[in-house]
Amino acid sequence: MTARAMLLLVLALIVGVTWVFAVVSKRFEKVLSGVVDLEPRSFETLTVITVGTGGTFENHWRLGPSTAVAKGDEVLLVDVGRGIAGALRAAEIPVHQPNTVLLTSLLPENTVGLDDLILTGWLAPRSEPLRVMGPPGTRAALEALLRAHRSGIEATAAEWGNTRESAEVQVLELEDGAEFEVAEFAIRVADLPGGSFPALAYRIETDGRSVVLASVGFAPESLVALARGADLLVHEAVYGASLAAALEAVGADRADVLRREAEIHPELETIGEQAREMGVGTLVLTRLRPPPVYDFQYEKIVREGFGGRVVIAKDGDEIRP
């Protein structure tokens, strides 16, 4: 073998070994990113993170509905849907950092992640009980959840040495007009009556900026009063034209289910007009039904009634008023 051929062979081996190490390193980084402890995040200004933007049904591209409102080291969660621990990690928020949950209703899509948040955060560990606030029925729901996990909590506490008390929750049921503070946040609550179950909307303010969050279309006049002049509104919607097509395509029983579910939510075709009436600066749309194929299609519909900023949210988006 000539010296030239030998040199080429050595160079090829070096390139091959380097490539192997690069692949292994990338794989190691990917695995490590799923288990390494995250440092708590700090936010300079009021920030909304759409942690999960899915709705009632399973969708691996959009995890269960949950929106974080953050300022400084404080992170509030509004609703806690499926896959919350993974969704928080994807948003680079430690699962034990949120210490307050505000529930807009007790629909399963808003609550099925609570045990994940409470117990996975407990192992992180969370140093004190999580605060959970919501409509009437919240206390009974949390008591039943913790009762179901009691034996597992006791076994884990014995194995890990964690205190059982930090796996507990502090529950507060809220009424229309309630006002309270959490760290730097001033929070006001509005009841959204007229539906088949209790539902709430929240206005969260700090440093002269305000965010309003809701998840049903009941009592739009109550939401307008709460949200008037807010900087940012986080809401959901059903695309009415898509619903009409779906109703024609399915059987009578399924059509009735779709129709009754749609009655809970505002239509995409009218949500822009509501946002304009409120005078909000930014409209963030989440848990859309059905999820958009292209964002611009939904944006165009909403902009027919609203001239402000429109955000068709994806999991992990960060929006500042």
Image (tube, rainbow, N blue to C red):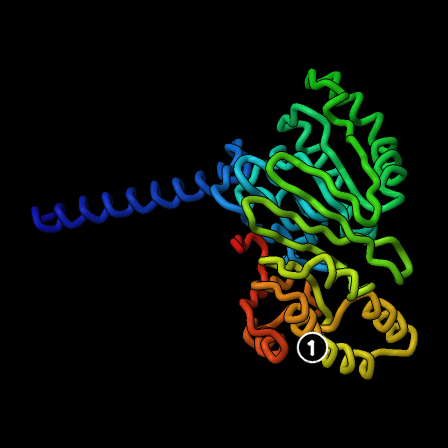
Count of picture labels: 1
For the question of whether residue 104 can be seen, the reply is yes
Give how far across and how far down residue 45 sits, in percent.
50, 45
> Label 1 crowding class (10 Å Cα cut-off): few <14, some 14-19, many 20+?
some
241 displayed left or right of 34: right
The residue at which mark 1 appears reads as: 269
Give how far across and how far down residue 266 sits, in percent.
76, 69
Looking at this view, is 215 or 291 the one in front? 215
Residue placed furthest toward the left: 3
The image shows residue 61, relative to residue 67, as above or below, that is below
Residue type, mark 1 in image = Glu
- Tag 1 secondary structure: helix
Give how far across and how far down residue 185 sits, in percent.
63, 41
At x 77%, y 46%, the residue is: 112
Q: Looking at the rendering, which quadrant does residue 182 occupy?
A: top right
63 displayed left or right of 243: left
141 displayed left or right of 31: right
The image shows residue 263, relative to residue 37, as above or below, that is below
The image shows residue 244, relative to residue 177, as above or below, that is below
At x 82%, y 64%, the residue is: 219
Looking at this view, is 208 or 99 the one in front? 208
Looking at this view, is 97 or 72 the one in front? 72
For the question of whether residue 61 can be seen, the reply is no
Give how far across and how far down residue 90 sits, in percent.
55, 46
At x 76%, y 38%, the residue is: 132
